[in-house]
């Protein structure tokens, strides 16, 4: 019987240049191993699987800007379009000091899978700049954003590739990107980015969408395994737009958020944290450290906290073979992109922990980004209630189909999600054929 995570195929690593091989670069290698595991389930479409192992287009740009002190600084930026067989590229832009090309490649590939999993008509893309934005003034940040947008402007556009917010980027960054692209085009193009301010064509409900999607699929999964949300203990890593919103929704549904970790530290309260007060504290201070209504917790001890639900909602590569064995949760819901390594995935599976993977769990954000894009094209905007209802319906339907595939093939939810998504992507590739 194949392993529930999927039977590894014979990876054609000898056909790949070294920078694309699984054992060379962390996040990208993790993605390649995920593709290898799903390959035996693709049937005749497996002949196209190399399509998934090679980004369609990778752009590396120099981003020079005038600093406030009169010097000129150079930053390295990226935009990767992994696959556009099903539609224009779609994916966020992150500003972080540890951004690398291999990371952006992996994130763009996971966007391809995610978009296909919820069946929105997008391919996968991602972008980033290697910079610590906290070290920049507001003026420097604007100049960095505008120059980066100009540099990648040759490959983005409302029908080509649509950026969105990600780590350390927000509505203001998207407004600057939209304005810069529009100035270069000579006409306002609101559909070039999503996650914009509502006054500039943004969508109601977008900011909360990813966290709402995490909550929605979490509730659906809990129902399948007989886990009651009311009274369930929840631990959350990352307490921003994803983890914070998901934690708030779980608390409102009667769960107890007992532990939270972010870049400032870890906190714990067995009786349950006051989530609204904690969100206010994070907004005021920038992190969870120092919150009066909790005890400090060692960062490593966070992974061993007694809980039913664990939500990693920070960065990739957080759950590894080193800490996966300490996790006591019945269910892990991946709010972040790529937070679990393949080795950790196997450990969790062997320990009976249900993992709801990022490529379905955090797809709420791109789903509402799709709504925003559609609204921009039609210049007709929906109410927040309409948006939330459509989001919940799409997420529930997508998860139901994936759960059925998981039961049919006796595989994990991650492998089932990849089966559904890869079949959709490769079927589109096959039907389109190769040109010329």
Image (cartoon, rainbow, N blue to C red):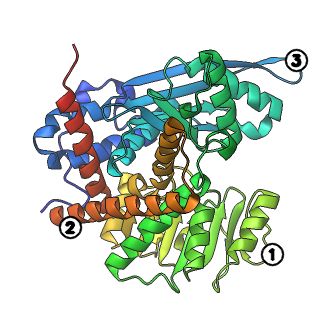
User: SS for tag 1?
Assistant: loop
Quadrant in the rendering for residue 260: bottom right
Identified at 36% across, 78% down, the residue is 223
Q: Report, in whole angstroms, how far the alpha carbon at label 2 lies from the one at label 1.
A: 45 Å
Say whether disc 2 or disc 1 marks the residue closer to the N-terminus. 1
The spot of residue 199 in percent (x, y) is 69, 43
User: SS for tag 3?
Assistant: loop
Say whether disc 1 or disc 3 marks the residue closer to the N-terminus. 3
Q: Is residue 354 left or right of residue 295?
A: left
Quadrant in the rendering for residue 280: bottom right
Tell me: residue 49, above or below residue 370.
above
Q: Is residue 4 left or right of residue 234?
A: left
* Residue placed under numbered mark 3 in the picture: 70
Q: Report, in whole angstroms, how far the alpha carbon at label 2 lies from the one at label 3.
A: 61 Å
Label 2 Cα crowd, 10 Å radius (few <14 / some 14-19 / many 20+): few
* Residue placed under numbered mark 2 in the picture: 407
Identified at 18% across, 31% down, the residue is 431
Disc assigned to residue 292: 1
Comparing 56 with 179, the one in front is: 179
């Amino acid at each position: 019987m194949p392993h529930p995570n999927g039977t590894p195929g014979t990876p054609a690593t000898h056909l790949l240049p070294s920078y694309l091989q699984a054992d060379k670069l962390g996040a990208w290698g993790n993605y390649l191993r995920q593709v290898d595991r799903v390959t035996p389930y693709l049937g005749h479409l497996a002949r196209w699987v190399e399509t998934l192992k090679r980004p369609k287009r990778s752009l590396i740009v120099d981003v020079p800007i005038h600093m406030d002190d009169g010097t000129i600084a150079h930053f390295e930026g990226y935009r990767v379009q992994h696959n556009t067989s099903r539609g224009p590229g779609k994916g966020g832009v992150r500003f972080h000091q540890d951004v690398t090309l291999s990371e952006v490649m992996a994130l763009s590939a996971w966007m391809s899978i995610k978009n296909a999993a919820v069946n929105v008509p997008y391919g996968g893309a991602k972008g980033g700049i290697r910079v610590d934005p906290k070290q920049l003034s507001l003026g420097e940040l604007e100049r960095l954003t505008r120059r980066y947008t100009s540099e990648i402007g040759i490959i983005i556009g409302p029908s080509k590739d649509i950026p969105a917010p990600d780590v350390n980027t927000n509505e203001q960054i998207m407004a600057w990107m939209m304005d810069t692209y529009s100035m270069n085009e000579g006409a306002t193009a609101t559909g070039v980015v999503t996650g914009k301010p509502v006054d500039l064509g943004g969508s109601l409900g977008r900011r909360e969408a990813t966290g709402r999607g995490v909550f929605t699929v979490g509730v659906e999964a809990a129902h399948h395994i007989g886990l009651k949300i009311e009274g369930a203990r929840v631990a959350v890593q990352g307490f921003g737009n994803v983890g914070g919103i998901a934690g708030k929704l779980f608390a409102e549904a009667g769960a107890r958020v007992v532990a939270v970790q972010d870049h400032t530290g870890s906190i714990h309260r067995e009786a349950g944290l006051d989530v609204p007060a904690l969100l206010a504290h994070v907004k005021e201070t920038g992190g969870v450290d120092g919150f009066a209504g909790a005890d400090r917790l060692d960062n490593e001890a966070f992974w061993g906290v007694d809980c039913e639900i664990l939500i990693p909602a920070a960065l990739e590569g957080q759950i590894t073979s080193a800490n996966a064995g300490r996790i006591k949760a019945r269910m892990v819901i991946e709010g972040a992109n790529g937070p679990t390594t393949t080795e950790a995935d196997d450990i969790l599976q062997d320990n009976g922990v249900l993992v709801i993977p990022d490529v379905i769990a955090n797809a709420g954000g791109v789903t509402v980004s799709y709504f925003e894009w559609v609204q921009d094209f039609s210049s007709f905007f929906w109410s927040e209630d309409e948006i939330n209802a459509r989001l919940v319906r799409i997420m529930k339907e997508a998860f139901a189909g994936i759960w059925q595939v998981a039961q049919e093939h006796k595989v994990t939810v991650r492998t089932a999600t990849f089966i559904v998504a890869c079949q959709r992507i490769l079927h589109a590739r096959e039907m389109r054929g190769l040109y010329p």
